[in-house]
Every structure is written in C-alpha cells, then in structure tokens.
Amino acid sequence: MREIIVTPHAIQRYKERSYTSETLPDEQINKTLSLIARKGSVTRRCPGGSYEMTYNGDAIVAIIKEPQIKVLTFLGDKQYRQWFKKKEIKPRYARAL
C-alpha cells in the first residue's frame, strides 16, 4: 500500500474550492484527498512531473513516486473547474490576442 502525503496547500485549496468544506475539520479533508489519491485515475500529465488525478468528479494534482503519492493541490469538482475555465482562463487568452 502506498503512503499518501497531503500538503497543507492542498487542504487550503480544498477549503477554498469545495462547497462542503466549511464544516469539515482538516482531518476529514485529509482523508478525502487521500481517497482521491488512492482510488483516482490519472487524467493527464502536468508540469513538473506531476499528474492530475480524478475520482468521483473531484480532481487533485499529485506527484507519484513509489512508494508514495504526494498531493500538491486540489483543483475542485467538475462544476467548479468548468466555471473557472469559463470565467478565468478564457478571458485571459482573449486579452492576450
């Protein structure tokens, strides 16, 4: 079984980007992020040798090095990521052109 390390940054991002995080203690958030890392599938490669992993619509960025997985950040659920892409990413590219 792999050791899973969750960074404080990932816990902070979960609090900012999740609708249910207001009442959850850090230990429960840690368990949720560990579950995504343990049962999630790799969606794509990210810069710096990291990978995006998703499970039940939630996504994280993690570094996978045997025998451990280090969760770097929480990207949000599918709905949040679609909103972010529409409101933040597309306008950035439109301004660049």
Image: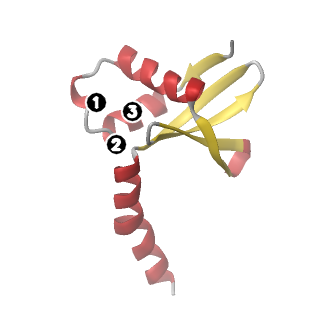
Secondary element type, mark 1: helix
Q: Amino acid at mark 1?
A: Ser
Q: Name the residue located 57 percent from the left edge and 33 percent from the top edge.
A: 40
Q: Say the numbered circle drawn on residue 17.
A: 2
Q: Name the residue located 28 percent from the left edge and 30 percent from the top edge.
A: 21
x, y (%) of residue 64? 71, 31
Secondary element type, mark 3: helix
Density class for disc 1 (Cα within 10 Å; few <14, some 14-19, many ≥20) is some
Q: Name the residue located 43 percent from the left edge and 23 percent from the top edge.
A: 32
Residue farthest along the bottom direction in this orientation? 97
Q: Is residue 8 above or below residue 74?
A: above
Secondary element type, mark 2: helix
**In the foreground, 10 or 60:** 60
Q: Amino acid at mark 3?
A: Gln
Q: Which residue is mark 3?
A: 12
- Label 2, label 1: how far apart the Cα atoms are: 8 Å
Taking the image as shown, residue 33 lies to the left or right of residue 39, namely left
Q: Disc 3, disc 2: CB below 8 Å?
A: no
Density class for disc 2 (Cα within 10 Å; few <14, some 14-19, many ≥20) is some
Q: Disc 2, disc 1: CB below 8 Å?
A: yes
Q: Earlier in the sequence, mark 1 or mark 3?
A: 3
Q: Earlier in the sequence, mark 3 or mark 2?
A: 3
Please tell me in which quadrant of the rendered image residue 63 appears: top right
